[in-house]
Image (tube, rainbow, N blue to C red):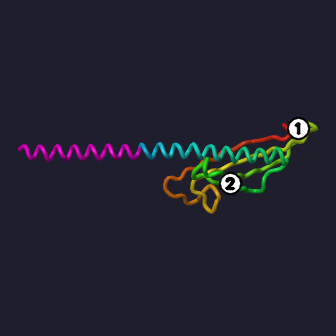
């Protein structure tokens, strides 16, 4: 009788240990993906700043799609951001204003250096941000 009880307790303890290891692994991956999401956000924000600077300082949008290289020391897997800009001219009274719609997309698995990746692998993280700029304000 004690042998059956011992085997049963051993099975229960093994199942509990397996469950704890599984939970620990999931929590670890969640924190890693959270950090990657933060890096993706800041990489996309950098792309927006680049597009806004180009639009206001140069007075025109960057070409249709630009890949901005980022330092790997600061952004880890996010080494490039794809920036797209559309511009349109609007007239308010006698003042002509240029409206820029800037979109920056950052991902940790770019396809040939371009985000978004149409066929991403496991642990793919992507962030896309948009910004509207009017010049002159």
How far from the left and from the top, in percent, is residue 26? 41, 45
The reply, left or right, for residue 56 in relation to residue 110 is: right
Q: Quadrant of the C terminus?
A: top right
Q: Main secondary structure of the magenta part?
A: helix
Q: Is residue 96 above or below residue 60?
A: above
Gap between marks 1 and 2 measured at Cα:
37 Å
The reply, left or right, for residue 72 in relation to residue 30 is: right
The answer to whether marks 1 and 2 mark residues whose Cβ atoms lie closer than 8 Å is no
Classify mark 2: helix, strand or loop: strand
The reply, left or right, for residue 13 in relation to residue 105 is: left
Taking the spot 57% from the left edge, 53% from the top edge, the residue there is 77
Q: Quadrant of the N terminus?
A: top left
> Residue lying farthest left?
1
Which one is in front in this view, the residue at disc 1 or the one at disc 2? 2
Q: Is residue 115 above or below residue 127?
A: below
- In the picture, residue 65 is in which quadrant? bottom right
How far from the left and from the top, in percent, is residue 71? 65, 51
- In primary-sequence order, the first of circles 1 and 2 is 2
The reply, left or right, for residue 2 in relation to residue 54 is: left
Range of residues picked out in magenta: 1-26
- In the picture, residue 46 is in which quadrant? top right
Taking the spot 63% from the left edge, 55% from the top edge, the residue there is 115
Taking the spot 78% from the left edge, 53% from the top edge, the residue there is 62
Query: 87 or 34, which is in the foreground?
Result: 34
The residue labelled by disc 1 is 92
The residue labelled by disc 2 is 69
How far from the left and from the top, in percent, is residue 16? 26, 43
> Residue lying farthest bottom?
112
Crowdedness near tag 2: few (<14), some (14–19) or many (≥20) residues, C-alpha within 10 Å: some
How far from the left and from the top, in percent, is residue 45? 67, 43
> Residue lying farthest right?
94
Crowdedness near tag 1: few (<14), some (14–19) or many (≥20) residues, C-alpha within 10 Å: few
């Amino acid at each position: 009788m004690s042998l059956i009880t011992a085997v049963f307790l051993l099975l229960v303890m093994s199942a509990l240990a397996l469950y704890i290891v599984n939970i620990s692994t999931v929590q670890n991956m969640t924190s890693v993906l959270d950090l990657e999401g933060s890096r993706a956000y800041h990489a996309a924000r950098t792309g927006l700043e680049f597009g806004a600077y180009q639009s206001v300082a140069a007075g025109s949008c960057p070409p249709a799609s630009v890949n901005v290289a980022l330092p790997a020391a600061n952004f880890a897997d996010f080494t490039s951001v794809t920036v797209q800009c559309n511009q349109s001219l609007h007239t308010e009274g006698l003042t002509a204003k240029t409206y820029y719609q800037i979109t920056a997309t950052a991902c940790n698995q770019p396809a040939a250096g371009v985000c978004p990746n149409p066929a991403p692998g496991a642990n793919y993280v992507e962030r896309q941000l948009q910004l509207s700029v009017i010049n002159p304000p």
